[in-house]
Image (cartoon, helix red, strand yellow):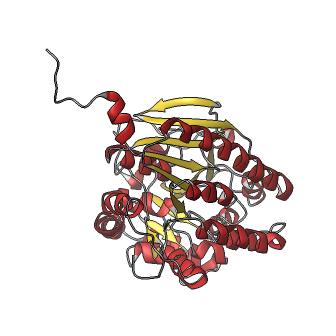
């Protein structure tokens, strides 16, 4: 007997909204922010397609993971100013072509386009979408003009990046951003309100049986396993993230060198560095020049399933990002990852990171390397109970104010809100 109450498949195809997310600098599901948003849209009843580059061992073509359609276009990662500019133009062109093709499969349905930067070169695509009645969302993950101004070789292009940013914001119905610093800047420059969507889904624990990734530096492969008795083995400090000029890894290595001579540094420690980027070779060379090969392990880029074990393996997170205008805008993933897991954090006093952690971290008194070394020394000298208390406060703050459970409903409400946001008011 036919079930007359069941909605025909062709009717569902016409009524189900189609959300297309496009990102240019990472594939999914590696990009945790885009992946969490895609899953939230799926759970809200949308058909979801993510358009992203085929890099980090991903292959071009179509795929489907957890009910999310993925279109990966051929791409590359440029090194240096000219190659990075070529990468930006190529990825923007390839992504726009793929997005237009995907939207042709859902004509006649409610459509939504979300553009995640960097870079901000997809404003023509946003204009194209708006002309066709497609709701447009701009996810400003990074402040590209400020980043360009802080990097040698890119600072002369700052006016170009400002123009692209202005056009993309003007072509968007909704602007979302991960930081209060970015929200305030957008309101001041463009008179637009941005909704703060700070974090992505962050696992709070991993099964203890999962081993940490093996180090890629053979010289450092003899580091002993962690045990619950930290007096029997060195405390393992961690660094996690992209390793670029603005990320401060060489400053962290300088701080580690100072700690060997620090009057309060009696607790043995090691440093594990997880990540990759253009500054990694120079960081490795810097560690060797400082005589730190016996203290520092470089794990390289962590693939899917390797980040959680790495976080489980460390005793504290170090956040060495230096004092430049761009870093003050960033709500850093390594900070929220550590907060979610109750890992103690030593960091420099960048404005947005300070907002994130409140009093629940070992914060340097100023932005110098010496002050950062002092903050790490304080963490090392504290009792396990004191470190656990500070980390517990950070985890409670994360769960109350910064977790994806807090932001997922706000994200869905913001991007499907029927009216356009045009004037600044609190998010």
The quarter of the picture where residue 383 lies is bottom left
Say which quadrant the N terminus sits in: top left
Q: Residue furthest left?
A: 1
Please tell me which residue is depicted at 80% across the width and 51% down the height of the picture: 79
| Viewer-proximal residue among 71 and 25 | 71
358 up-or-down from 65: above or below: below
The quadrant holding residue 379 is: bottom left
Visible in this render: residue 209? no
User: Which percent across, then down, holds residue 319?
Assistant: 55, 66
Image location (x, y in percent) of residue 251: 67, 68
The answer to whether residue 73 is left or right of residue 115 is right
Q: Is residue 60 left or right of residue 272?
A: right
Q: Where is 141 relative to 11, above or below?
A: below
Res 409 visible: yes
Q: Total of numbered circles in the picture?
A: 0
Q: Quadrant of the C terminus?
A: bottom left
Question: Where on the picture, by quarter, is residue 2?
Answer: top left
- The one nearer the camera, 256 or 24, is 24
Q: Nearer the viewer, residue 291 or 94?
A: 94
x, y percent for residue 120:
67, 61
Left or right, residue 290 beside residue 347: right
Farthest residue, direction top: 1
Give how far across and how far down residue 21 sits, in percent.
52, 49
Camera-nearest residue between 394 and 108: 108
């Amino acid at each position: 007997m036919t079930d007359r109450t069941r909605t025909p498949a062709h009717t569902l195809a016409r009524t189900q909204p189609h959300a297309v997310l496009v990102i240019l600098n990472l594939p999914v599901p590696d990009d945790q922010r885009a992946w969490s948003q895609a899953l939230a849209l799926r759970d809200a009843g949308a058909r979801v397609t993510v358009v992203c580059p085929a890099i980090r061992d991903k292959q071009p073509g179509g795929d489907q993971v957890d009910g999310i359609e993925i279109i990966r276009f051929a791409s590359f990662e440029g090194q240096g100013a000219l190659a990075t500019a070529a990468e930006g133009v190529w990825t923007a062109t390839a992504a726009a072509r793929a997005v237009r093709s995907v939207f042709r499969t859902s004509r006649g349905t409610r459509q939504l386009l979300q553009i995640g930067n960097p870079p901000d070169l997809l404003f023509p695509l946003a204009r194209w979408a708006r002309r066709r009645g497609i709701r447009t969302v701009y996810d400003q993950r990074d402040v590209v003009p400020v980043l360009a101004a802080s990097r040698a070789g890119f600072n002369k292009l700052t006016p170009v990046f400002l123009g692209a940013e202005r056009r993309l914001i003007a072509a968007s119905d909704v602007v979302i951003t991960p930081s209060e610093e970015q929200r305030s800047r957008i309101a001041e420059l463009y008179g637009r309100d941005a909704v703060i969507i700070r974090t992505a889904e962050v696992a709070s624990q991993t099964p203890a049986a999962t081993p940490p990734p093996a180090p890629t530096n053979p010289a450092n492969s003899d580091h002993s396993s962690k045990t619950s008795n930290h007096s029997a083995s060195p405390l393992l400090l961690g660094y996690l993230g992209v390793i670029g000029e603005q990320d401060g890894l060489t400053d962290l290595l300088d701080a580690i060198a100072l700690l060997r001579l620090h009057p309060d540094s009696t607790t043995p420690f090691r440093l594990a560095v997880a990540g990759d980027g253009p500054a990694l070779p120079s960081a490795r060379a810097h560690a060797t020049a400082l005589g730190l090969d016996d203290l520092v392990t470089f794990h390289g880029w962590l693939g899917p399933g390797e980040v959680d074990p790495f976080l489980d393996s460390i005793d504290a997170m170090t956040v060495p990002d230096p004092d430049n205008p761009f870093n003050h805008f960033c709500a850093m993933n390594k900070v929220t990852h550590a907060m979610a897991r109750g890992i103690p954090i030593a960091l420099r006093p960048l404005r947005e990171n300070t907002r994130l952690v409140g009093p629940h971290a070992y914060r340097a008194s100023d932005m110098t390397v010496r002050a950062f070394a002092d903050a790490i020394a304080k963490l090392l000298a504290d009792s396990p109970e004191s470190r656990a208390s500070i980390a517990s406060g950070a985890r409670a703050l994360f769960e109350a104010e910064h977790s994806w459970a807090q932001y997922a409903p706000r994200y869905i409400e913001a991007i499907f809100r029927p009216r356009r946001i045009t004037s600044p008011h609190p998010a």
